[in-house]
Image (cartoon, rainbow, N blue to C red):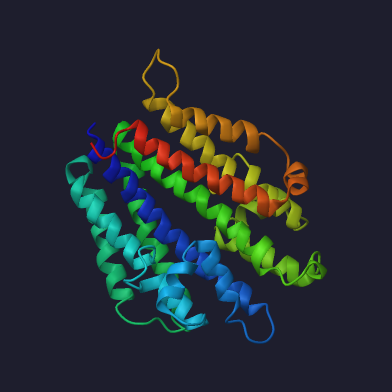
Amino acid sequence: MLGKTANGLFWMYRYLERAENLARMIEAGQRIALTRLGDTDEEWLSVLKAAGTVDAFHAEYDEVSKDAAIDWMLRSKANPSSVLSCIEGARQNARLVRTALTGEVWEATNAAYMGSRKLLARKVSERDLPGVLGRIRQHTALVRGMTHGTMLRNEIYDFARLGTFLERADNTARILDVKYYVLLPSTRAVGTSLDNVQWETILRSVSARGGFRMEYGSGGGPREIAEFLVLDRRMPRSLLFCVTKMHENLSYMNTPGRDPMASLRMVQALHRDHLATNIDQVFDFGLHEFIQKILTELFAIAQQIEIDFRFYR
């Protein structure tokens, strides 16, 4: 496969996953803000930090407000990581690799683009925000469903999955960081009803509440939630699940009989050094520090994938 085609597939699915995940992060910020008393505008600075867009935001706005932060993350053309920008980027990459996609995948991607442009043509009111975020998730889920249902399980599919799960792991880590490190009011809140409500919000934001209740019933607390999102092998948005899928797809593309490529070795090391553990060791290390380490490793893996597969040649 040509490097440019691999690059287009990888980034098409990264952008789609990023758009959905950013919508989830906005929802997490909105729900957590509802549990706080007083002015919550400054809380959106925390969400911007977790999304990695705070510096670019400050280049456009003098101060942080809820309305400005949500508009920036949803539809700002000045923000290359806004939901609208990501969906536009996904469609642009899909056009570049059109012959590698089935007709159903292309049509779903185009529909996601057209639908999102309509939804985000103007500033979204607070009343309409939950519905808009839900529609965006539905658009991206349709592309994912068409991919699973119509694509051959070949290198094209492997690059699509690589982009999806690398971006998803990055997002799960960031949403956890929003809660644990940035949005928690103080250490005095740990274990309180406020703390529990915010952890419940994190589950909702990654569509994990139902699965968590099946596994733990009504007795699971923050420790179990963190374990579920970091180390559960069956939860499709946990860090361990995503890294395992990345390993599988890179393994499929590794030339038989040859040593593992550098990106595959890095994924193996990430699993061995950070995810072959238990949640008590994660908390002893520090959840925020653990998450930052995971994010750094994921960034390095993405760069190495570009090198290994000669994305720009």
Percent from the top left, x then y, of residue 224?
A: 73, 51
Farthest residue, direction bottom: 38
Write down the quadrant of residue 272 in the picture: top right
Farthest residue, direction top: 257
Residue that appears at 42% across and 30% down: 250
Check the picture and name the quadrant holding the C terminus.
Answer: top left
Residue that appears at 23% across and 40% down: 4
Whether 114 is drawn above or below 227: the answer is below
Horizontal arrangement in the rendering, residue 38 relative to residue 306 (left or right)? right
Write down the quadrant of residue 33 in the picture: bottom right
* Residue 235 visible to an observer of this rendering: no
Along the line of sight, the residue nearer the viewer: 195 or 267? 267
Along the line of sight, the residue nearer the viewer: 187 or 278? 187
- Counting the numbered discs, the total is 0
Check the picture and name the quadrant holding the N terminus.
Answer: top left
Percent from the top left, x then y, of residue 47?
A: 55, 68
* Residue 1 visible to an observer of this rendering: yes
Residue that appears at 65% across and 42% down: 231
Horizontal arrangement in the rendering, residue 64 relative to residue 80 (left or right)? right
